[in-house]
Every structure is written in C-alpha cells, then in structure tokens.
Amino acid sequence: MQMTLAEIAQLVSGDLDGDGSIKIHDVAKIEEAQPGEVSFISNPKYAKFMETTGASAVIVSRDFPVTKHPTIRTDNPYLSFLKVLIAFHPEEETVAQGVHPSAVIHATARIGANCRIGACAVIDKNCRIGENVTLHPGVVVARDVQVGNNTVLHANVVLREQVCIGNNVIIHSGTVVGSDGFGFAREGEHYLKIPQVGGVIIEDDVEIGSNCSIDRATLGNTIIRKGAKLDNLIQVAHNVEIGEDTVIAAQTGISGSTKIGRHVIVGGQVGFVGHIEVGSNTTIAAQSGVSKSLPPDAIFFGYPARPIMQAKREEAALRKLPELLKRIAAIEAKLKQTEQ
Amino acid sequence: MQMTLAEIAQLVSGDLDGDGSIKIHDVAKIEEAQPGEVSFISNPKYAKFMETTGASAVIVSRDFPVTKHPTIRTDNPYLSFLKVLIAFHPEEETVAQGVHPSAVIHATARIGANCRIGACAVIDKNCRIGENVTLHPGVVVARDVQVGNNTVLHANVVLREQVCIGNNVIIHSGTVVGSDGFGFAREGEHYLKIPQVGGVIIEDDVEIGSNCSIDRATLGNTIIRKGAKLDNLIQVAHNVEIGEDTVIAAQTGISGSTKIGRHVIVGGQVGFVGHIEVGSNTTIAAQSGVSKSLPPDAIFFGYPARPIMQAKREEAALRKLPELLKRIAAIEAKLKQTEQ
Amino acid sequence: MQMTLAEIAQLVSGDLDGDGSIKIHDVAKIEEAQPGEVSFISNPKYAKFMETTGASAVIVSRDFPVTKHPTIRTDNPYLSFLKVLIAFHPEEETVAQGVHPSAVIHATARIGANCRIGACAVIDKNCRIGENVTLHPGVVVARDVQVGNNTVLHANVVLREQVCIGNNVIIHSGTVVGSDGFGFAREGEHYLKIPQVGGVIIEDDVEIGSNCSIDRATLGNTIIRKGAKLDNLIQVAHNVEIGEDTVIAAQTGISGSTKIGRHVIVGGQVGFVGHIEVGSNTTIAAQSGVSKSLPPDAIFFGYPARPIMQAKREEAALRKLPELLKRIAAIEAKLKQTEQ
C-alpha cells in the first residue's frame, strides 16, 4: 500500500510543508524511520531527531519550529500519526468467516450473521452470540453465555456459564471470565465452599488483556463498565465493579466487592483490599497498596496508598533517616556533655 | 423452586418467628432482597437494614434484638444462609455425561464411572481418572496422571505428566499443574537447564483458582495438602509444600522449597522467598514480603514481613518523619544558639 | 536403568573413592537418598548429612574432608550431579511423532521433519515450523508465525500472528506470546485503541514459564534475547527488550519500552516502569519497584529500588524510628526544662 504525502496531509487535516507527491508506504518511530516512511514528534524531547531522521516527512504540532525537513502540521501529532498507522495497517481477519468444521457448537446455541468461529472452539447450550463476532481457536464458551456484536475473543479465552459480554469487546488469550469467586466459610477445622451463583457483566467497548482472572459474583454481578481497559494478568474478584473508561495496568489485583469509579487510572501491580470505594478521576501509582476508600480527583501512591505529595515527602525523609540517627546521637552527646 | 419459611427454618434448624406458610423462591443480600427472598444478618453493622429490607424473612443470630420483621434465629446465621443458598442453587452440571466425541482419550487411559469429559479435552496414555470426574472442554491431561473421584477440572486446565490429584478437588480454568520448576545452573556465560523430574501431589478437597502456576518438583514432590484453598494467579514453585486447610489469596508467589504450615492465612500479592518455613495458624497480610521463616500462631505484615504491631508502629512513625526532620533542625538551631 | 559407580565417575570425570562395581539406579537429595542412589554435597551446610545418608555414594568437591563413605570427587559437584540426573532421567517424549489426526494444520503451513503435533493443536496459514519441534495438545499458532528447530510449546500455549520463535526454545503451558500491547490514546472522555502492529522475537535457547504474557510491539519488536530464562506469570509489555542470559523470577512485570541488559538477575514480583534501561550484570532483589534506569554491575533493592546497602541501612533505621520518636521528645523536654 502506498499514499502520497498530500493524501496523508488530507487524511489528518494537516498543513503540508514539502513535496506532496512523495510516496509513503509505512510509518515508523522518528529514530528508526527510513525514506518512504512518515513519523511524528509529539514529545519535545524527541525534537532533536528532526535533524537526523530518515523519515520522508514528520508530523509535528502547529507551533513546532520551522525546519527544512518535510512536515505535516496538525493539532495533535500523536493522534494524527495513529490515523496514518491505522490506514497503513488495516486489521487483517485471521479467522475465516463461518464455523470451522472442528469447532463444537451446541444445537441450542444461536450464532449471529458474519461470525468467525475458529478451530476447536466450543460453544455450549443456550448461548447467544451476536453478529460479526470472532472466536479464535480454542475459545470455550460455557452454557447460557451472551456475547454482543463485533466482539473478539482471542485464542483459549474461557467464558464460564451465564457470563454476559457487550458489543465491541476485545478479550485477549488465556483470560478467564466467570470463574468462581474465592469464598469459603470456616466450619470447625475446615472450609465450606460458598456457592458462587452470581454472574459477570462486561459492558460495551471494554478491552481485557491476556491471562486475566475475572471472577463471577457470589450473588449479583461482577461488573466492568463501558470503555474500561484492563492490561494483562489482572485479578478481578467477585462482586467488584470497575467504572466507565477506567484504565488498569498489568498484574493489579482487586479484592472482593470493591468499587472503582469512572476514569480512574491504576498503575501496575497495585493491590486493593475488599469492600472499599475509589472515587472517579483518581490516579493510583504502580505497586501501591490501597487499604481504604479513596476520594475522587486525587493522586495516590505507596504502601499503604496515601496522597502522592505526602508519600513522596515521607520517602524523601526516609532517605535521610540513617544520617538523622547520627545527628540525634550527636545532640544527645552534646546535651550530656552540657549537663556534666 | 420454592420452599416455605417453615421448610427453610427446618433446613437450618432455626426458630421461626413469622408466618411459616410464606413462599420463598431465592436468597439475596439484605440491602437488595425483595419479597419472596430470604436474607441474613451476621455482621451487626448490617442490622440497620432490618427496618428497610424487602426480604420476606431474615436469618439472624439467637440474640438479635426483637423485631416485627419475620426472622429465623440460628446459632450461625451466615452458615444457615449458605445452606439455603445451596438449596436454591443446586450445582448444575454443564458437561454432559460420558465422553464428548471430539475429546481425545488415549487407548491406555482408564476413565471411572459417571465421568463427564467435555469437547476437545485430551487425556494421554496411562492416565487413571476416578469416578464422577468432570473435565470441561479444552482440558489437557498429559501421560501418567492420576485424578481422584468427584474432581472437577475447568476449561483449559493443563495437568502435566505424572501429576497426582486427589478426590473432590476443584481446579479452575487456565491453571497449569506440573510445569517445570525454574531451575538453572550457571555454566560459564550460559545457563544449563536442571531437569525437573519430580512431581506434584494435590490432596483431597483442595480448590485452586484460575490461571495459577503450580510447578513440579526438581526431585520429590510439590505438595498441596488436604483442604487448602488457593485463589487466582498464584505462583507455587518447585518443591513447595502448602499445609492442610491453608488459604492463600490471589497473586501470591511462593518460591522454591518453602514450606507453609496448616491453617495459615495468606493475603493477596504476598511474596515468599525460597527455603523457609511458615508455622501453622499464622496470618500474613496482603502485599507482605516474607524473607525468613515465621513462627506459628502470629500475624505478620509488611516488607519485609514483621509482627503486625511492630510494622504498624513503624508505619505510624514514618508518617511523622517529615515533621520530625523539622523538629530536629529546630533542636540543632537552638543548641547552636545556646553555644554562642 | 542402572549404572555402576565406576561408570558414573567416568561420566562426570571424577575420582572414585569406593567400590566401582556398586550398582546405582537413581539420584536423590542427600537427606533422602537410599541405597542404590547417588547424591551430592555442594553447600558445606549439608556436609553433616554425610554421616547419616543412605546414598551408595556422594559426589563431593575435591577438597571435601576424607570420609569412609564412598565418594566421587569433582570440580563442581552440583554440575556433576546434574549430569547424572540427566543420564538417569532422559527426557521422555510425551507427544507421538507426526501430526495427531485431531490437530488442525492450514494447507499453507510448512512443518519440518520429525515434528510432534499433539491433539487439537492448531497451526494457521503461512506458518513455518522447523525440525524436531513439539507442539503439545491445545497449542494455537496464528498465521505467519515462525518457529525454529527443536523448540517445545507446551499445552495451550498461544502464539499470535507473525511471532518469531528461535531454536531450542521452551515455552510452558498457558503462556501467550504476541497479544496486543496495552496502548490507548485519550480522545475526549474515551480511549482510542492504538493498533499494535509490531511483532515479538524470541531468540534461541530462551525458556519461558507458564501463564506469562508477552505482548507484541506497537511498532518494531518486543525482543527476548538468546538464552534468557523467564519464570511463571511474568508480564512483558510492548517493545520491551530483555538481554542475553538474563534470568527473571515469577510474577515480575516489565512496562513498555524498557530495556534490560545481559546477565541481569531479577527476583520475583519486581515491577519496572516503562522507558528505562537496566545495565548488564545487575541484580534486582524480589518485590523491588524499579522507577528509573539502573547502572550495570550493581545490586538494587526496595521500593523504589536503590543500591542494596543503602536500602538495608534505611530499612534498619526505620526499625529504630519508633524509639527515635521517644528520644527526640526526651531531648525537647530537656531543652524546655533547661530554658526555664
């Protein structure tokens, strides 16, 4: 595939400064781009590469300094670059349309139009699969599951019984949705399993990474709301609720019944205790331990999580502690001397 | 399904205060229950919902204050509620009895009576599968594996060769039992793989969550003892031993050859170094890092894990550290002034 | 299988002190070994077992004290022991040669000589699989993947499209290679998915544990270099690069675009932020949080990771902090008294 610089400028509604007839065949990072490729500079610290880049043109912000290099000026160079990237790399369907002969579909399952069901995928009884859905090979969908339109389940995803998935959802390989919540009641020396009879609701436009564990509710539902994005290896316990457009990085774990608001940003390897609430628009830095409810519109950090300025002050003070011990010993010695 | 209040009172050996002929069709949380549902109050902080609940009856403790609302009084309202919950939600078999035609069973494998083997499940040579065992779709059981009676392996579980699983065990989707332990010997610039020729023994009544990794031993066995309960995404390294009725929350990792006693409770995201022992009945709070052996019957917390009272004292002191720096600077200034 | 002590001594180029005709049938740990088994002592703290071991012979270092027990003396008893272990436990192929009839191989895929493709494995179009490769049951290989010679993919591994795997690589069950990197651009209230059009390169002699998530690059490649060893449940984000012969323990997470050097050793549950570099031969202790680039040839520890001596000093000082608070209050009281 090829586009001219003029066509690319038009695609991103940008102002071209250079030869519009130059042929472009791909995009690349500014420090790696070769002739025939277009790149971008969004972060000023990459501006230095403008002099040395091999790119045939660079997408920059409208106030970027004048340069001899061909440029396309736009309001948001990064978003513009993404549009060019998408244009050069249209998503290629990797599963053939229809149902692969080795897939096992129960007679009572209903599959919508234009679905792609891969080899050895399994769909059990009473499932309702929407239109344009892709199930990659090895996906297992248990009984009574609903899946909306345009949803993609990557290889070896497991949806347990009665799970409900919305439209335009992407779930990556190895993720398990609807496993039993971790609930046991102690009865003498042993534990009695608490039946986990609730469900899981995953709303539209959610994306979940690979090898995540999303447990079903004890009663009611575990809910991941519209537009939320989860990275890989994340634990979502029973009855958790994750708000709209919230973003959670890899290896974070959320304990039972905790509710996370809208537009929250959670770093990697964060842990949340159960039965707390996190307000909307709050950010929690990586590796934090959230031990109680947090207000909205704030930034938290540390173990236990506390306001980031406080946490950083305490961290900085901790760095000085060994020296502090010496200073205090010196004061005590001086006072002792004075007394004598 | 329906039961009368009188039947429910009898099921839980409770004293009914209300109309025994009321029809009940399900259970629900006290704050969400509707007419026709029964609920419970175990924690006093939920007592306030007694006035407003829609539940047709509430299971309470024998000393709960007198109320106009229909109640069933029992010794342990929560356990009573669970019994009602189980009665209304009998476990529904989701895999049909027998062997699905797409399953691949080696001619030398022996499968017990009343098993349910799902689509695309694979059982390799010389395996011995007990009675009433369920293998959900996509389960892979390698050669020479033994599985006891009434055990359930959820979709896409992998049991590697020679693994030994007891009776009444539940293993959730995506969990891998018997992968090679992580062992390498440095030989010059490179690493020589240490063969992992031991096994894994999972005793009766164990439950393991989804996407866990339970490694086989280098020599001997990795052992998870009777009644232990593991949550999701847990790492159990080679030669680890986990004691009876020990409970471990999600994303915890246990390094090689560490032994954890009986009735230990481990929070989420805890890490254990290798070659240590944790005494029975000890509790370790979430996100702790256990860097040395711990005694029995104690509570530990923090990084590194230390007795919880000490850890909390130190945490509280750390909160005061920035202010402390100022107080010390003030003392030093005062002393300097005095000297002059 | 049986070997004489003389044959074992020859295998490890060791000096036998004892009856060379003694028959040996297996290896065992020094404290568990029985007659007919050979063991080893590498760590002096196990020397005490020499008196009581049941082993028919013990491999020891050349300077081990003289003992009545039959010994084989070598330069590196542990490596020698491993060679004997490998001799007694030759790796047994668990997948039959050829392609299992239930496997689904696309007509355009090319499979090398002597491969073993297990039940329900799936290989999609245009794949190139080398010689002597083993795919255990349930492995899914998407389109345009390359796999080198002698590589082993354990049950239910997923290789996404265009992933490139070298020779002599081992990938354990449930691991996903080539899932989409976690990249979103905020556009108003919602997130726009950034296409992840790069690849993953896994070089020769790499071993990756079970249930890991190795994401594909946004552009370019995520790279795991020759001889690197990864444990279980590890997160490798888009565009990460891991150097040759680097070893990473379980549940560690590496954020996007971070580069880790050669011969680095990383403990379990470590987190790395994105876009940093870690120098070669550096060691990072378990549960550390690496928040900025680290130099080579050093040891780091803690949260945030800092030089281990500094971190330990600060930790030790923190232990004294509660007592310090009292000492400072005492100083202040004394000064106040002096003033009055």
Image (cartoon, coloured by chain):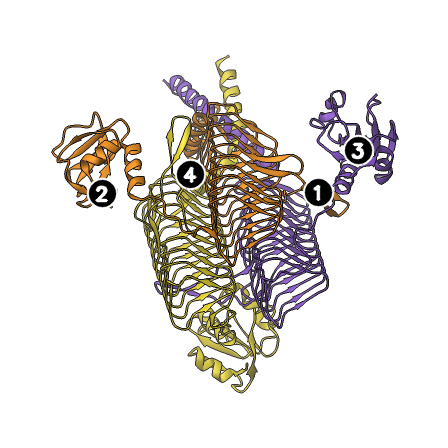
Chain colours: A orange, B purple, C yellow
Tell me the kind of residue under disc 4: Pro
What residue would you read off at disc 3?
Answer: B24
Question: Which mark is nearer the camera, 1 or 3?
Answer: 3
Distance from the alpha carbon under mark 2 to that under mark 3: 69 Å
Instruction: Classify mark 2: residues with Cα within 10 Å, few (<14), some (14-19) or many (20+).
Output: some
Q: CA distance from mark 2 to mark 1?
A: 56 Å
Q: Of the residues shown, which amino acid type is indicated by label 3?
A: Ile
- In front: label 4 or label 3: 3
Q: Residue at x 57, y 69 (%)?
A: C30
When the figure is inspected, residue C57 is found, relative to residue B61, above or below; the finding is: below
Residue denoted by label 1: A194
Q: Which residue does the numbered mark 2 point to in the structure image?
A: A31
Q: Amino acid at mark 2?
A: Glu
What amino acid type should be assigned to the residue bearing mark 1?
Ile
Q: Nearer the viewer, residue A253 or C30?
A: A253
Label 2 secondary element? loop
Q: Earlier in the sequence, mark 2 or mark 1?
A: 2
How far from the left and from the top, in percent, is residue A29? 25, 42
